[in-house]
Image (cartoon, rainbow, N blue to C red):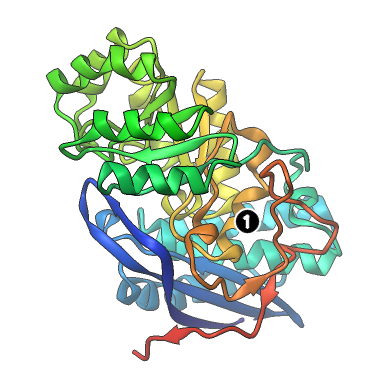
Amino acid sequence: MNVSTEVLRLALRDPFRIARHQPDQVATTVITEIDLAGLRGLGEAHPVAYYGETTGTVAALVPLLAETIGGLGDPPANVADARAWLRRTAEAMEAVVGRHGAAKAGLDIALHDLVARGLGLPLTELLGTPEEIPPTDFSLGLDEPATVATRAARAGHFPALKIKLGGPADLETLEQVRQVYDGPIRVDANTGWEPEAALRLLPELQRLGVELIEQPFAARALPRLRWLQERSPLPIVADESCETEADLESLVGVVAGVNVKLMKCGGPGPALRMMRRARSLGFKLMLGCMEETSVGIAAAASLASLADWVDLDGNLLLEDDPFGGLELDATCRWVIGAAPGLGVERVEKSVDKLVD
């Protein structure tokens, strides 16, 4: 198995800020490429420091994980055996290191792309997921209320907006957004609220047509999350509190929903199993992303049919996506085509590459 990684720094269309840190001007991501048994696969690892990952940890782990996978032999040439082989590769990576979901996702996405290409199947068919998917929302970062409202008006064709909150002007921001946008609003505090302030906001959120509240409190503040969910008519969705399938049991009875992301749980294979398990435990499901290129978004879109809420807009936040082939239709649904694998390839665009 030959594996390569490439670090990309990609400008964002607008500065993007969440409650935990200052605005990002660029998205830093790692593209992985695998050659195995005469086949090629593309993947993406988008490291987030909050989860203990950087481009350095990805660069260190990917070769180690690839070496482990290489001992499992070549992928089988039929769907059932290929699915079992892919599960073994994910289990082998988990045995090497815990967490580090982005590094694992970089390889898991590439392996799924490689296997699906070899079988001549789109990724949805390899995974066994329907092609019909819900539309994606569009995310707006923390900023001055008027600035957020201007961006909301620009994104008015999306059937839902996700508004980042956790700043001093949350209510004013939502008031101004509602003046220019009449669709559902989803709010994400990224751990930035305190309990009493969140409780005071609840009736205002209802009045303004908010659909759900994502991660209001710190990741491990499960008693606080339970306390708010018991008082909230709106579903609370755990994101930072829910990285992998192993986190699900502790959230039963605490929140109504969980946000599954490939970059947290380790790729499409682990995400598929996590979503099925979450559904069996009674959770509502959001499928989310980081500021990824079309490589990561295409991989996640192959699972979108299983979600109640789709938040796959990372590539839309980029000024210049270096990959093409993934298209958004008029209803803001990602088009799952018949091309084998992810259905995306690199296009010639200007990219600022970091040299290690």
Residue placed at 42% from the left, 66% from the top?
A: 12
Residue placed at 51% from the left, 27% from the top?
A: 184
Using the image, determine if residue 327 lies above or below residue 324.
Answer: above
Residue placed at 41% from the left, 50% from the top?
A: 264
Residue sitting nearer the eye, 88 or 333: 333
Work out which quarter of the rendered image holds the N terminus and state it.
Answer: bottom right
Label 1 element class: helix
Query: Hey, which quadrant is residue 165 in on the image?
Result: top left
Residue 231, how many percent across, how many down?
28, 8
Query: Hey, which quadrant is residue 228 in on the image?
Result: top left
Is residue 71 something one can see in this rendering?
A: no
Q: Looking at this rendering, what residue extends furthest in the bottom direction?
A: 355
Is residue 146 shown left or right of residue 345?
A: left
Residue 77, how many percent across, how many down?
84, 64
Residue sitting nearer the eye, 109 or 236: 236
Using the image, determine if residue 149 lies above or below residue 249.
Answer: below
**Tag 1: amino acid:** Ala
